Amino acid sequence: MSSPLLPVSLVGVKMIKEKNLNRVLIVSIIPYFLEKGSFWFEENFEKILQIRKVQSWWQDNTLIPEENQIFNFSQFLRKLDELGYEKVYKVGGIGEFSQRGGIIEVFPINLNFPLRFEFLGNKILEIERLKIEVKNEKEVKERLKKKLKYQKIYSQLDHLKTGDFLVHLDHGIGIYNQQLTINNQQYHQLEYAEGDRLYVPVGLERKLSRYIGFTQPKISRLGSPLWQRTKKKIKEEAEKLAKELLEIATIREIATRPPYLPSNEIDFQLASGFQYTETPDQIQVIEEIEKDLEKNRPIDRLICGDVGFGKTEIALRTMIRVVNSGYQAVMICPTTILANQHFQNFKERLKNLPVKINLLSRLQLKREQKEIIKKLREGKIDIIIGTHRILSKDVAFKNLGILIIDDEQRFGVRQKEKLRKIRSSLDVLSLSATPIPRTLYLALSSLKKISLIQTPPVGRLPVKTFILPWSEKVIKEAIENEISRGGQIYYLHNRIETIGVVKNLLENLVPGARIGIAHGRLREKELIKVMTKFQNKIINVLVATTIIENGLDFPNVNTLIVADGTRLGLAEAYQIRGRVGRSHIKAFAYFLYGRNLSEKAKMRLKALKEAEALGSGYRIALKDLEIRGAGNILGREQSGNINQVGLNLYCQMLSEAIEKLKPK
């Protein structure tokens, strides 16, 4: 919305008096006013008084309180809210206001100092100037402009439904009730604790955001100082995190390394041997990494994407490019099974290329491990894939260039930093199957390089999902149908104590099936033996616990049967379903349930059914996947803070803290 321009040449009476302030101007936080300096308002004060009498725009966007004026206390607070000022526990910056008893403090954007209003009932007894002053007005207003932009981005209020949890910047967490019209003005009605209600004008939703968190939020009480204290504490925590992130970013900015050599014949051969067509997202990420490799700054990039969307292929191509420049590459995996699977797949892809690849884990014989470590130190191995064994003190490299962290959310900060200490200019590429929320991406994008892969592979079909009561007939037909087309089956039974009984049941149901068992209590050697048999199709039905969730990739497995779908969280069920349908073959997932189905379980299973579309983890995960992604990337200690104010507001706070602390 534009406003009539006031000529700067018109000089009015100065509103700031030496000893006292009888009448003051407070203007709304909008781009038009943020462009003006405090001197402009001082010069044009009288002109603004006149224009307010005839133009509603000026009435809506300004407030002119006077000493001894009768002004409804609640309406004064509401007006500050409508002008865009943020309610805080204690005023410390421009654009904020606070209230304690009959005292209201506000820091107008048109002044370089805050004001204190003392009320007696609905009468303004006194207006005082507080001693805080703005040193760099231009810089502060630039941050406020960005804050307006963030508020708009983080609102995300599409498709509001009754019962949705919303967070109001000034008043805390409430429940959305309805949209209604009062005196020709439309409002969003929010319900708060103790029957309190808040009416937010439609068009002024910039202070509202959806609540996204792991827990059922505690509904706030209107007027309680608890929300302001909570917000203050979490803002301080966000600033601490922003400082740590900036320090890490600064250290990496200082480090340098020679640019890698351009792509050569080996890179082209590897790319041409990829059996799938690259998705647009994959191509974009490959190009982003190409640019990273051409620079003399080390890479620190996070690649986020749904299961089976091609992160590993990008990692392999990056490692080969690094190896071609004379460096070694390491991929560290959270489990021996995953490390073994990557090793077998990479070995197959690289069999015709002059690249030496090996595997290192504690399952190998001591003499084998010793020989591999010796070759690593001598530079006789180009690519090493392994587990935490790579972190051991006896492991050293001749010329390590890049570290790939697979399933990065499963590694602690100390483990990651230990690898980075090998070389200050080490390139690091992290892979994560947990989707990163858009809001967190925006908050971190100025500090950390993040690539999102959201496009499913070409020819990939959605997994047909069935939500059904547990039935031997359904199980028998599902297994027989998959075996008849040469495929394999995951049967998920998440109780180790009775997993043997289930194997016997399935053998009786489908006598021709070749059944194996996999769970976390098996010795690792035994587990790898079973998984190798499954990979080589000697076993065609794998009865397993949720161990199958962890990054396994078998394109021939195209039927999933979950014995009790109610025992899985939404995010976990979504991730596990992603373990089937990894190729162009139609896949099926059966989530079975018992007789007593709770309302919550029904809702979870319904959401899973509705999320059949590929890549829809970004939509169904508003409550679960997104907060899990944020917790993984920011660290467990931040999850509690996120739960208290919701992911969107937390990310907004983090964005503002980063902007505030970033060197200009």
Image (cartoon, grey):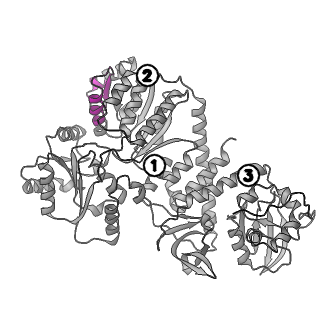
Residues packed near mark 3 inside 10 Å, few (<14), some (14 to 19) or many (20 plus): some
Q: Quadrant of residue 255?
A: top right
Whether residue 232 appears in magenta in the rendering, the answer is no
Query: Which corner quadrant of the image does residue 249 belong to?
Result: top right
**Looking at the rendered structure, which numbered label has been put on residue 632?**
1
Question: Which secondary structure lies at badge 1?
Answer: helix
Q: Spatial distance from mark 2 to mark 3, Cα to Cα?
A: 46 Å
Q: Residue at x 45, y 55 (%)?
A: 626
Q: Residue at x 34, y 28 (%)?
A: 270
Name the quadrant containing residue 467. bottom left
Residue identifier under label 2: 327
The residue pinned by badge 3 equals: 140
Under mark 2, the amino acid is Tyr
Q: Is residue 268 left or right of residue 535?
A: right
Label 1 is placed on what type of residue?
Asn
Query: Which quarter of the figure is the N terminus placed in?
Result: bottom right
Q: Position of residue 48 (x, y in %)?
A: 84, 67
> Does 58 sit left or right of 628 as displayed?
right
Q: Which mark is first along the chain, 1 or 3?
A: 3
In the image shown, does 347 or 249 lie closer to the viewer? 347
Closer to the observer: label 1 or label 2? 2
Q: Is residue 352 magenta?
A: yes
Check disc 3 and give the amino acid type: Val
Q: Bounds of the magenta span?
A: 340-369
Callout 3–callout 1 Cβ contact below 8 Å: no
Question: Which is more foreground, mark 3 or mark 1?
Answer: 3
| Distance of label 3 from label 1 (alpha carbons) | 32 Å
Q: Tell me if mark 1 has few (under 14), some (14-19) or many (20+) residues whose alpha carbon lies within 10 angstroms of its own.
A: many
